[in-house]
Amino acid sequence: MKKLESTWYNMTVVLTLISVAAGAALAYVNDLTAGPIRIIKEQQLQDGIKAVLSADDLTVKDTEEVDGVIVYRTDKGTAVQATDPNGFGGKLTVLVGFDSKGTIQGYRVLESAETPGLGAKAGDWFQKGQKGDIIGMSPAKNNMTVSKDGGEVDAITASTITSRAFLRCVNAAYAALAAEDAQSGATRQAEDNTYEEE
């Protein structure tokens, strides 16, 4: 077979064909894996909701989004998913479980690009009995910022940026919960007033 002459035209055609073939292969693989990845993420979310509410058997009754924060109302409490884009390694997504009084029951880090061995410790550092324990605290009553900033929570050693991002997620989760509770209360009051007028 005759060797292809090395010209700008030939190089452009060959590189274009390679790029199109690679793009098609990537699109095909992405299409194949999108479904299983979605199923795995949904299962992780369901397991996370059960873990943060300490309940093996629960039913999600309602899901609502408030300013980018997702609120999952269940028959055992409320789980709220919040994301902060400014962790040390990028985006940090945390699921926080609250009881009816707004007290933190548990949490789970759903997505993190933090440094292994440092910021990645957020999954354990703030759990019950650990140095930065937030379980049983309430953002309404406690100063949920790191002690370096005057708050009540010990930051992860050598990972203050990650700790701040984590606590911003917790505070955003509580703010969305409180906003939805206030809205629900106003709606219930408006409905009660409507019934009274009839």
Image: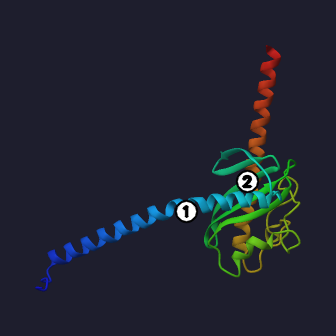
- 186 sits to left or right of 16: right
Residue 36: mark in rendering: 1
- Which residue corresponds to the image point at 86% horizontal and 47% vertical from the top-left? 100
The image shows residue 34 at horizontal and vertical percentages of 50, 61
- 66 sits to left or right of 15: right
Q: Where's the N terminus, which quadrant?
A: bottom left
The image shows residue 50 at horizontal and vertical percentages of 77, 58
Task: Give the residue at the far top of this rendering.
Answer: 198
User: In which quarter of the view is residue 26 placed?
Assistant: bottom left
Residue 60: mark in rendering: none
Q: CA distance from mark 2 to mark 1?
A: 24 Å
Amino acid at the residue labelled 2: Val
The image shows residue 178 at horizontal and vertical percentages of 78, 46
Front disc: 2 or 1: 1
- 194 sits to left or right of 113: right
Crowdedness near tag 2: few (<14), some (14–19) or many (≥20) residues, C-alpha within 10 Å: many
Count of marks overlaid on the render: 2
**Mark 2 residue element:** strand
**Mark 1 residue element:** helix
Mark sitting earlier along the chain (2/1): 1
Crowdedness near tag 1: few (<14), some (14–19) or many (≥20) residues, C-alpha within 10 Å: few
User: In which quarter of the view is residue 3 placed?
Assistant: bottom left
Q: Is residue 56 above or below residue 61?
A: below
Asked if residue 169 can be seen in this view, the reply is no
Along the viewing direction, whichever of 59 and 103 lies nearer the viewer: 59
User: In which quarter of the view is residue 4 placed?
Assistant: bottom left
Amino acid at the residue labelled 1: Pro
- Which residue corresponds to the image point at 69% horizontal and 56% vertical from the top-left? 81
- The residue that label 2 is drawn on is 80
